[in-house]
Amino acid sequence: FKKVAWSNMKRGDILCNSDLSHVVIYEGNNKIIHASNSSPYPKGGVKESPQYLTSGTCLRVKAFYNGSKNNKKQVAMV
């Protein structure tokens, strides 16, 4: 993982609020994908929402193919 400035967020970045109690994936266009446990399904669960976090940590993960025959993705630090 690499810390990234909030002003440089890109699609796929992981955002964590200040106390790390909520983690989301930045989808781009000021939208996030996250799990909401505040209500039972269908109101809760995984959903897309406007990006509402204003502080915390933004992390970038890089996925790559390792060249193996099964072509599985692996995650590396960038």
Image (cartoon, rainbow, N blue to C red):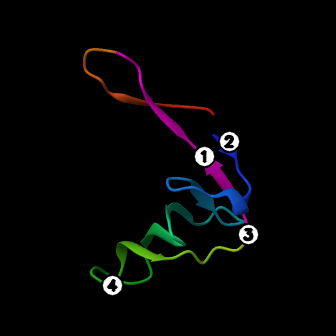
Return the mark for residue 43.
Answer: 4
Percent from the top left, x then y, of residue 72?
A: 32, 27
Q: CA distance from mark 2 to mark 3?
A: 17 Å
Q: Earlier in the sequence, mark 4 or mark 3?
A: 4
Q: Residues within 10 Å of mark 1 (few under 14, many from 20)?
A: some
In this rendering, position of residue 52 left or right of residue 50: right
In this figure, which residue is indicated by the disc labeled 1?
A: 60
Where residue 51 sits, quadrant-wise, is bottom right
Whether the residues at callouts 1 and 3 have beta carbons within 8 Å, the answer is no
Residue range highlighted in magenta = 55-67
Q: CA distance from mark 4 to mark 3?
A: 25 Å
Percent from the top left, x then y, of residue 21?
A: 61, 66
In this figure, which residue is indicated by the disc labeled 2?
A: 2
Whether the residues at callouts 2 and 1 have beta carbons within 8 Å, the answer is yes
Up the image or down, 67 lies above or below 26; here it is above
Q: Residue at x 52, y 63 (%)?
A: 24
Q: CA distance from mark 1 to mark 3?
A: 16 Å
* Mark 2: amino acid: Lys
Up the image or down, 58 lies above or below 41; here it is above
SS assignment at label 3 = loop
In this figure, which residue is indicated by the disc labeled 3?
A: 55
Q: CA distance from mark 2 to mark 1?
A: 5 Å
In this rendering, position of residue 55 left or right of residue 43: right
* Mark 4: amino acid: Lys
Up the image or down, 53 lies above or below 76; here it is below
* Mark 1: amino acid: Arg
Q: Earlier in the sequence, mark 1 or mark 3?
A: 3
* Mark 3: amino acid: Ser
Q: In front: mark 4 or mark 1?
A: 1
Where residue 34 sits, quadrant-wise, is bottom left
